[in-house]
Amino acid sequence: MPVYDIRSISQVGTTEPFELQVARGQIPGHRFVHRQGRVPAMSINTTGTVWDVDDTNYPWSAWDTAGTVTVSRADAGDTDKNVIITGLDADYNPVSTTITLTNPTGNTSATVFKRIDLIRMNGTSENVGQINVLKGAVTVARILAGVGQSLKGTYTVPAGYTAYLTQGTMTIQEGADGSGYFYYRVPGDRFLIGHAFEVASSQYYYPFTAPFALPEKTDLDVRVSVRSNNAPVTAAYDMYLVKNGGPL
């Protein structure tokens, strides 16, 4: 029986593309992040964040203080299923917890969050009904029925890292058009527009000539203003997280 050498070329003295080396964990202090969002139906002449809630700007003010969150289910078919929540703690360091949906009125986390990046179902079955994560009385993340995870076009750079945004894209349904905005907010400032663009019946794609540098604790928010037809919209962007002060 023949013996095959399955080692990558980078393991025998030859280099691979930088992107592949980061994905394989070969460059210390570097991590790739892909963010994706989708809004099911943004109303005409309405501006909102590209996330799982229609016609709504993301409620950043709910995170003025860190705190616990409550996960609620809309369908009894999701009883005893597990939801994984990933985000940042009070010091903007990555944190994750798993919540089991046992209480019809919602289960509260023991973990304290300052931001939430992603929620997803844990296990082999998707959610039957809608899953909401609330901070106080405010919805800060959602899984739509049957989707299995949030599609939330927001992100916050963790403490100790700088994010380097490399590209972004947005799509809108056929027959609709709108204006897209990539907002960012560094600590202590207001949201600014880092990139504005138009999208109509297709995909908008923009690779940054030089990556857009975003310091630690910067908030990112992709929004869209729809001018014609109640439209589903998607947005996605890629970045590298690089640890400040060099690899550790």
Image (tube, grey):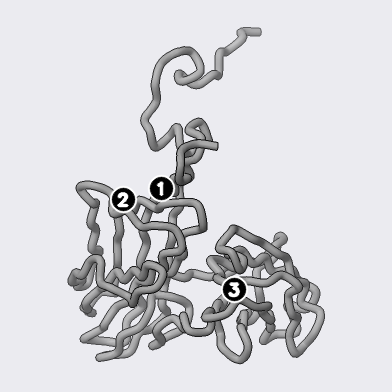
Q: Secondary structure at mark 2?
A: strand
- Check whether the beta carbons of the residues at disc 2 and disc 1 lie within 8 A of each other: yes
Q: In this picture, is 113 found above or below 10?
A: below
Amino acid type assigned to the residue bearing label 3 in the image: Gly
x, y (%) of residue 188? Answer: 39, 73
| Local SS, label 3 | loop
Q: Are marks 1 and 3 in contact (CB under 8 Å)?
A: no
Q: Which of the image's four quarters has the C terminus?
A: top right
Residue 246, compared with residue 133, is above or below; it is above
State the residue at coordinates (67%, 65%): 84
The disc labelled 2 sits on which kind of residue?
Answer: Thr
Residue type pointed to by label 1: Tyr
Q: Which numbered disc, 2 or 1, marks the residue that appears first in the sequence?
A: 2
Query: Picture coordinates of residue 200 (x, y %)?
Result: 19, 73
Which residue carries the number 3 mark? 146
Q: Name the one closer to the observer, 53 or 93.
A: 93
**Residue bearing the label numbered 1:** 240
Q: Earlier in the sequence, mark 1 or mark 3?
A: 3
Mark 2, other Cα within 10 Å: few <14 / some 14–19 / many ≥20: some
The alpha-carbon separation of the residues under discs 1 and 3 comes to 30 Å
User: Mark on residue 166?
Assistant: 2
Badge 1 crowding class, 10 Å Cα cut-off, few under 14, some 14 to 19, many 20 or more, is: many
Find residue 123 and report its image quarter.
Answer: bottom right
The reply to whether residue 34 is in sight is yes
Q: Which mark is residue 11?
A: none
Residue drawn at the location 46% of the way across and 42% of the way down:
245
